[in-house]
Amino acid sequence: MSTAPDQQRREESAGLMEYSTESLVPFGPIHPALKEPEYFKLVLEGERIINVIPRIGYVHRGLEKAAESRPWVQNMYMFERTCGICSFVHSVCYGQAVEELTMFQTPRRAKYLRTIILEMERIHSHLLWVGLMGHWAGFDTLFMWVWNDREVVLDLVEAIAGNRVHKSMNAFCGVRRDLPENMTDRIVERMRFLTDRARYYRDVIDTEETMLKRTENMGRVSADTVEKLCAVGPMARYVGLKRDVRFDDPYAAYDEVPLDVITTTQGDVHALLRLRLDELIVSANMVTYAVQNLPDGPIRVKIPPIIPAGEHSSHCEAPRGEIFYYAKSTGGRTPDRIKSRQPTMANIPTALEMLKGQTLADIPIVLTAIDPCFGCMDRMSFYDTETNHKWTWSGEQLRQYGINYYFPERAKKQRDIARKAAPAANQCLKEEF
Amino acid sequence: MSQMSETLTQLEKYAEEAGTKITPLRKNESLVEVVQDRLEPFLGHLVNDLQIRHLMTITGLDLGQNLGITYEFFKERDTIHVRLLVPKTKPQAASIVNIVPGAILYEMELQDMFGIEFIGNPWKDHKLLLPDEWPADLPPPLLKTTKADQIRRRLGLEAAKP
């Protein structure tokens, strides 16, 4: 027999009424520490997730509407601020859509410079992600090592573009900064260093028990499902779909720089780790090739501020997958319509499929596996629909729960150490104050 | 190159069946305008027969009297925009989730931003990008007639304006 509050609660969770015996877990959206907020309604049967409904838009700032009232050039730097990790690729993609509307061609040297920055951005994004995977799996040493190596590539980006993340280096039909003199040897040497490190990390994830136990056989989805759900980037390549815009529809200098598209048919989170580390090595090779074969010539063609009427689209391969921009002009100083679509949006349906069948302890690792542009692990609140019992976990508690679930003996050891250390620590505090 | 033109040649055949034709926008980019009744069979041919299975996104457009819904497909260097026009007075279209399951979130996005109802979308009663408390009397935000000031005033956000 259902009571009135029960009835009301079921109506609130519209569409989920058929799961009356399962627990409904609201997940997110507020997360003070990590990137962006996101919200998922999880339906659990015991420990297993059986359905997920997403709710995004907590950081929707109306950029597409704002673009309609700003000049074409200003929009380039506004769209660059869409993402705080892969910023340059947004300005390149928007730029390409607009460049198609004009009669001007981008110089070859500028295309190479764009490729160099785009690939460095991919290296830094993939390193950031590998570190985060280490953190969520309970292997913080990996996190610290990888993020230390990430500084190497960020320093190079800063030396070339003047900024670490928001480069603001792109322009219509060109780039605003040339490669500084005598940088070639330094870049080649640093890329060799990063390649060695990536090979080492690949060995680590293949042999280290923590990573194997947390990532192997997690998040399996069939290739057919992934193709139907229109996943992009590494999320398509990890089940064997050869979907890479750099290869399918080359832009910048990708038709001249040698490129290997890495695919795997292993199809679990561990495959994603390997795949991204392999891609990192490919990117390092591409940067090396591009700086060694950088053509001479101008880096920019100046274009008038009024863009001729017409409509075009462009797509690029960001570190997370394909991004898409559409530009429509009526021949004025401002666009008539700009559409932008980010890779996380395209990958959410696949992520939901990945989550189904996993346990509560796997949520952080599986959600991080898609390399989302949101964090949202903090402040999970739970309630049991049967007993009406409510409780809240922070992201750190959820992470700890995941580690304890897989390594109970390690958690016990940590508790023992903490218990022994507590009296001594209290004594120290008393003496100090 | 031959593969690419073959895809487009076959597409032209299906476009003729649907009573329309392909307009090239530039090399490797074409536009097809389809009427509502013919959309579903046309997309069925596109996805199942020509194996153009990657839907990049769905773009909404405000074209004055009509709203444009552009399905952006991609296969091997060919970008194909399939455009459907719906009148502003009756903004309704059939959902294509049964043909392309990946379209589900893009349809929800258009529903929020342009007020187009997609009949058959399983999540059409949920909001995706707009807040749950978005006032019912406010028009969809991406229409040309909706001004940013109007939204700001209605939501009581004047103070945030510099």
Image (cartoon, coloured by chain):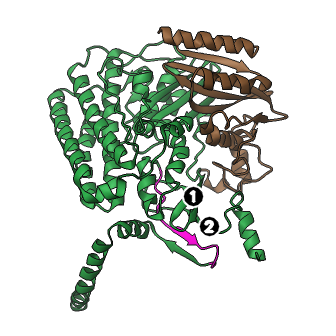
Q: Is residue A29 visible?
A: no
Q: Is residue A299 above or below residue B102?
A: above
Nearest to N terminus: mark 1 or mark 2: 2
Residue A185 occupies which quadrant of the picture?
top left
Q: Is residue A32 magenta?
A: no
Q: Is residue A90 above or below residue A60?
A: above
Q: Is residue B2 above or below residue A345?
A: above
The reply, left or right, for residue A25 in relation to residue B33 is left
The reply, left or right, for residue B104 in relation to residue A295 is right
Q: Residue furthest right?
A: B89
Q: Is residue B3 above or below residue A199?
A: above
What color is chain B drawn in? brown
How many numbered discs?
A: 2
Characterize the local packing of mark 2: few (<14), some (14-19) or many (20 or more) Cα atoms within 10 angstroms. some
Residue under circle 2? A22
Residue closest to the eye, A175 or A420:
A420
Q: Is residue A31 visible?
A: yes
Residues shaded magenta:
A374-388
Q: Give, as a three-letter code, the residue at label 1.
A: Ile
Q: Give, as a three-letter code, the residue at label 2.
A: Glu
> Quick one: SS at disc 1?
strand
Residue A309 at what x, y percent from top left? 62, 17
What color is chain A drawn in? green
Chain letter for the residue marked with disc 1 in the picture: A
Residue B159 at what x, y percent from top left? 64, 56
Give the spatial CA distance, label 1 vs label 2.
9 Å
> Quick one: SS at disc 2?
loop
Question: What numbered label is drawn on residue A50?
Answer: 1
Q: Are marks 1 and 2 in contact (CB under 8 Å)?
A: yes
